[in-house]
Amino acid sequence: MTRAADEAGPSRAIARSPAQETRRRATRRIPRTRGIRRQTLIGWAFVVPALVMYGLFVLQPLALTVQYSLYRWDGVGPASFVGLSNYVTVLSEPRLLETLFNAFRLVLFFSLIPVGLGLVTASVIQRVAGGRLGTMSRTVLFLPQVIPLVAAGIIWGRLLSLPGLVNQGLAAIGLDDVTRAWLGDFDTALSAVGIIGIWVLLGFCTVLLLTGMAKIDAALYESARIDGAGWFAEFRAITVPSLRYEIGVCLTVTVIAALAAFDIVYVSTGGGPGGATAVPGIQIYILAFLERQVGLASALAVVLVVLVLLVILPIQRLTRERAL
Amino acid sequence: MRVARSELYAGRALLVALMAIVILPFISIFTTALHPSGTAPAGLSWPADPQWGNFIEAFNVANMRALLASSVFIVLAVVPVSLLISTMAGFGIGLLRIPGARWLLLLFIFGLTLPFEGIITPLYFLAREMGILNTRVAIVLPLIGLFMPFAVFWMRAHFVNMPNEVSEAARVDGASTWDLFWRIHVPLARAPIASLGILMSIWAWNQFLLALVLVEDPTERTMAGALGAFQGHYATDIPLLCAGTTLILLPTLILFILFQRQIISALLQGSVKG
């Protein structure tokens, strides 16, 4: 945002009275007049409805979450102030701490694999599927992104079940030994949930990265090829660096999806078996609405909000440097 | 671009395989839905005697007509209001550049990263206090609020790039701020408003957590919320569950096939700006 542009708005808005035109940070020669105050009020009136809805239904609950987190409360009776002890519990009780670790394990599946595989897929589409196949694969791969996550969870709950398609396929290629109820097995449940995440997010990453690739100057590739660079050398030296911004966007969206995962987990495993797939979102729901530990649920919620911010901000910095 | 023949085939094989991985799950659900109610059929198998009646039964037991009506109601209650107030706010922040615009923008941007789980608990108690728990209003009002960070950010990104000449000319003609907004700038912003409308409709339709926590009756929920409830009730009757899931997915799939270009580009722009 440039300063010049910044000054233009309000002064133009009152262009009818030239005397008032020069107000603004840069030149404050003329004192504020009634007309300007009126313009300011009108301007704010445009923002107020959105601000009110945001304040009432987002900022207010957020403040309440912080407040609740300092109390022990069952949601019905009187609440007692307990200071930071809910936070101590969140960060020390293995059952709760494990949900945070699980959230980071999901980042591998929801974020790193879709972005990595998306880069490969996008570059494949770019190189070998110019025409109809390219358009079709874009559309098809994107499909899981528009259906409700709940539906993805139900569909994959079926696929990964004992008689499901996954085991059917494994048996067909002679891998009967590894077939199992993937979502019900303590060792594989979290990875199985992760697979659902890959399925949902791969197409989104692919298509987003593909639009970025279309903007890369073809001359770069030409000169690389004259230098005798192979596919991988090109990929590493040109494609990935040119897509820094798009990669950053993909990472941002998918990391939030991983850390704040709820729908898929709730529907496919409910956090089980034995807490193997419990993520913060699920645990907050269980604590607040099933176990009636509102304070503890809120402390975990605050930790989750802070965690997301801490992870997202560095990614944002990385991408903004070039973007702005 | 010159590409070796072997790479061409390998690449296309990879794409076909990926597409199969996306599509096979849908086919699996569909064929499962055709098996006799109460059985546990294999992943991909065409039944000897397809039970098309399962879809009718699912339509009735899921009360699909009420579900559709409820979801449509929620979308219609959320999206137009959200579009109007976020466009106004984007106009105020991006074009009028009111004093404090920078801070307002930061305040809205902060909300972009906020996970819904972070505020769901107090929302429940707020809704209870307001007496709107278990009504659609309990989904509608918070959803409008939750859409504001993205929607305002989106519209501001449009208005901040509008050349000033447009507004100047209107001012010279003596237009009021509201005229400037409604007669000049809203018509010019039709494209970003349409994309935003598509995005918010999909998100409202697919919203699950709010529906799960704030409304018990599936027929007062969003489509995703209703699907969750349906799964809860019919988890043991696999073919029926699959029939219901197929039906609930159908409107989304049809809309996606019809408007794929617009939906994909809206979702992509949305994430890039966000």
Image (tube, rainbow, N blue to C red):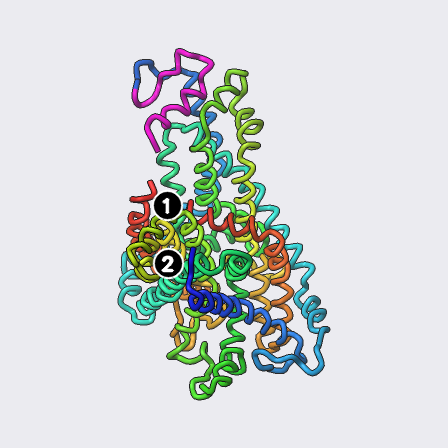
Please name the residue shown 53% across and 30% down the image: B185
Q: Is A221 or A159 nearer to us in this picture? A: A221
Q: Name the residue under label 2.
A: A255
Relative to A243, B72 lies left or right? right
**Label ID, residue A276:** none
Mark 1 vs mark 2: tell me if same chain: no
Left or right of A276 in this view: B61: right
Amino acid residing under circle 1 = Phe
Residue A247 sits above or below residue B57 on the image = above
Residue at disc 2, secondary structure: helix
Q: Position of residue A143 (x, y in %)?
A: 54, 60
The span picked out in magenta is: A1-26
Chain under disc 2:
A
Q: Is residue A15 magenta?
A: yes
Q: Where is residue A247 in the image (x, y as percent from the top left)?
A: 36, 54
Q: Tag on residue B110?
A: 1
B245 over B38 or under it: above or below: above
